[in-house]
Image: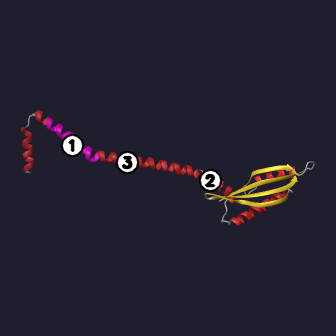
């Protein structure tokens, strides 16, 4: 009580101008304390939450875009799944498989295989390129059909180089030598 009485006595002794300056000063000090202790921390928290919300929104938009493409990605993956081997074959097994595939395509096209032999394996990173060299004889139409079937094979065979020439001067049969490759993972 002593402090309140002394404060009251102090205030009554002040002039009107001094009281106004004291009240204005107390008002500004109160506003400054209110700002520093209550308002600024609230606005800081609001701004940090807004920034976090914007960051989460961007993340959600990116995830939604990925999910919208999921069906397309899965369809593409299924489309090429047959080209990726489920279990790794040895080099001999893969070479044998390629030779059998080429022989089947030659039989379907009525092409007579004179000679067919592996041309080697080139390793590049994770993939291997199997090369097969062959010589064959047939009508030109049958050779072109054979080449078409090789290029459109489900085994991703590619004709790297070929040479076609007539068997003899007056013959309708042509000889062809070609180099076929397959890239395997």
Q: Determine the main secondary structure of the stretch shown in magenta.
A: helix
Closest to the observer, 69 or 96: 96
Residue indicated by mark 1: 30
* Residue 178 visible in the shown view: yes
Q: Report how far apart the C-alphas of labels 3 and 2 lie in the structure.
A: 37 Å
Q: Residue at x 48, y 47 (%)?
A: 58
**Element marked by disc 1:** helix
Q: Residue shown at 81%/58% (left/top)?
A: 105
Which of the pair 12/17 is nearer the observer? 17
Marks 2/1 in contact by CB < 8 Å: the verdict is no
Disc 3 vs disc 2: which is toward the camera?
2
Q: Nearer the viewer, mark 1 or mark 3?
A: 3
Q: Is residue 152 visible?
A: no
Say if 6 sits above or below 127 in the image.
above
Which quadrant would residue 96 be assigned to in this image? bottom right
User: The magenta stretch spans which residues?
Assistant: 21-38
The mark lying in front, picked from 2 and 1, is 2
Up-down: is 25 above or below 127?
above
Q: Label 2 vs label 1: CA separation?
A: 62 Å
* 179 on left or right of 27: right
Q: Which mark is residue 48?
A: 3
User: In the rendered image of this protein, does residue 146 appear above or below residue 87?
Assistant: above
Place residue 130 in its image quadrant: bottom right
Q: Which residue is mark 2?
A: 73
């Amino acid at each position: 009580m002593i402090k309140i009485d002394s404060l009251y006595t102090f205030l009554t002794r002040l002039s009107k101008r001094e009281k106004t300056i004291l009240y204005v000063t107390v008002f500004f000090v109160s506003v400054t304390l209110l700002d520093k202790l209550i308002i600024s921390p609230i606005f800081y928290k609001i701004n940090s939450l807004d920034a976090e919300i914007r960051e989460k929104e961007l993340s959600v938009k990116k995830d939604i875009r990925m999910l919208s493409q999921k069906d397309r990605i899965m369809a593409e993956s299924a489309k090429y799944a047959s080209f990726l081997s489920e279990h790794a074959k040895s080099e001999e097994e893969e070479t044998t498989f390629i030779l059998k595939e080429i022989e089947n395509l030659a039989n379907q096209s009525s092409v007579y295989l004179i000679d067919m032999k592996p041309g080697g394996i080139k390793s590049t990173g994770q993939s291997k390129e199997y090369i097969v060299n062959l010589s064959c004889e047939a009508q030109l139409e049958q050779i072109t059909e054979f080449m078409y079937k090789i290029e459109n094979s489900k085994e991703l065979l590619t004709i790297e180089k070929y040479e076609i020439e007539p068997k003899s001067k007056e013959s309708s049969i042509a000889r062809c030598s070609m180099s076929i490759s397959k890239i395997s993972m």
